[in-house]
């Protein structure tokens, strides 16, 4: 619910909602509906899942480390669980900016 109440564009809100629901069309999801394309990540060759795309691929890890270093976070986002825990904690205005940075990082990926 916090996603729908924050001040970001609707397309980013929908994107994050799809990510939370694991409905983003990644290779693994497309394979389940008999997609004939290559289900591997184009950056590293591993099976492309939502977790892989946003947290496990070396490119995603690099982005999250960069975001953490730039913003002075003590720890970079490293898993879906960690992402959602952080996202659910931005209810007050101070945390809201923090949450927007998390959402922005996700959108960039
Ligand atoms: Zn990858």
Image: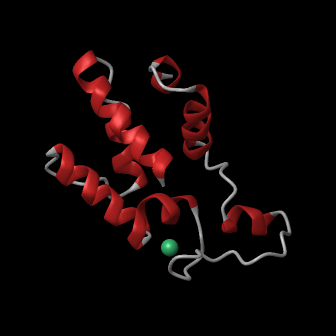
> Residue 56: horizontal and vertical position, in percent?
42, 67
> Residue 5: horizontal and vertical position, in percent?
48, 17
Asked if residue 84 can be seen in this view, the reply is no
| Residue at figure coordinates x 33%, y 20% from the top left | 91
| Residue at figure coordinates x 56%, y 58% from the top left | 50
**Is 64 displayed left or right of 50 in the figure?**
left
**Is 60 displayed left or right of 23 in the figure?**
left
> Residue 61: horizontal and vertical position, in percent?
35, 64
52 vs 58, nearest the viewer: 58
Determine whether 26 is above or below 101 in the image.
below
| Residue at figure coordinates x 50%, y 80% from the top left | 44
Image quadrant where residue 93 sits: top left
> Residue 76: horizontal and vertical position, in percent?
25, 54
| Residue at figure coordinates x 37%, y 46% from the top left | 83
Asked if residue 19 can be seen in this view, the reply is yes
Determine whether 87 is above or below 105 in the image.
above
User: Which residue in the rendered view is the most extreme toward the bottom?
Assistant: 45
């Amino acid at each position: 619910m916090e996603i729908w109440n924050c001040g970001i564009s609707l397309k980013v809100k929908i994107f994050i909602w799809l990510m939370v629901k694991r409905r983003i069309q990644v290779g693994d999801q497309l394979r389940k509906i008999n997609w004939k394309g290559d289900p591997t990540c184009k950056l590293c060759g591993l099976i492309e899942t939502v977790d892989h795309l946003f947290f496990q691929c070396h490119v995603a890890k690099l982005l999250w480390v960069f975001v953490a270093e730039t913003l002075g976070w003590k720890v970079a986002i490293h898993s879906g669980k960690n992402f959602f825990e952080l996202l659910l904690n931005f209810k007050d205005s101070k945390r809201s900016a923090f949450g927007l940075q998390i959402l922005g990082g996700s959108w960039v990926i």
